[in-house]
Amino acid sequence: MQLSPEERHKIYEEERARIDAEQKQRMTTGGSTTGLEPNIAGLLCYLGGWITGIVFLVIEQKNKFVRFHALQSIVTFGALTVASALLSWIPFVGGFFGAVIGILAFILWILLMVKAHQGELYKVPLAGHVAEGIMPVTWRGERPETGEEQKTAEVQRPDEVPKPPEHPEAPSPAISEKMEEFGKRRAGRMV
């Protein structure tokens, strides 16, 4: 059974869309100590700049998605507030720098609230790395530890190790054929 490049690309895109949808569903549903949905709490982390970031960092104890957005809000808007205050003291051009930083802060404010509401772990280039260093989270392609997975982790005792299934299901014949074909093609390229 030979797949054309278009068919392979279509299968790849469908699988990628399915995985992205599952990841977004896991992130935006689940437990939060605030009693809010994680995407709403993430949006609210940015609403009042670094102040609401501090509030949500203190209130939220278990959801890493919300805590990441709270930390990123503190770092991003705290740095912009300090930079604006320091640059505004420069005679003649201080007002210009303050206006530029204000416009940048407004654009970031809108962007970050939208991304958080969509359930994305959007990382601002410098501030996101600092926030990630303080509280690591997993990114696309890895399994995020948010929502339902955190609820499951709370139910299991720390000394309890989940057991693998006793009899894993064998892949369907079509999948087995594709796996064999892929292995042969890969082996042919390596020679």
Image (spheres, rainbow, N blue to C red):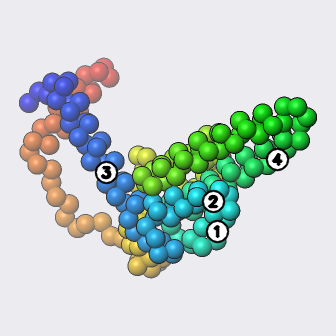
Label 2 Cα crowd, 10 Å radius (few <14 / some 14-19 / many 20+): some
Label 1 Cα crowd, 10 Å radius (few <14 / some 14-19 / many 20+): some
Q: Which residue is mark 4?
A: 85
Q: Secondary structure at mark 2?
A: loop
Q: Which residue is mark 2?
A: 48
* Amino acid at circle 4: Ala
| Foreground residue among 12 and 50 | 50
Mark 3 vs mark 1, CA separation in Å: 30 Å
Q: Give left or right: position of 29 versus 97.
A: left
- Asked if labels 4 and 2 touch by Cβ distance under 8 angstroms, the answer is no
Q: Which tag is nearer the camera, tag 4 or tag 3? A: 4
* Amino acid at circle 2: Gly
The numbered mark at residue 21 is 3
| Foreground residue among 159 and 82 | 82
The numbered mark at residue 55 is 1
* Amino acid at circle 1: Val
Q: Give left or right: position of 117 versus 79.
A: left
The numbered mark at residue 162 is none
Q: Which tag is nearer the camera, tag 2 or tag 3? A: 2
Nearest to N terminus: mark 3 or mark 1 = 3
Mark 2 vs mark 4, CA separation in Å: 17 Å
What residue lies at 23% left-to-right and 30% top-to-bottom? Answer: 9
Q: Quadrant of residue 55?
A: bottom right
Mark 4 vs mark 3, CA separation in Å: 42 Å
Q: Which tag is nearer the camera, tag 3 or tag 1? A: 1
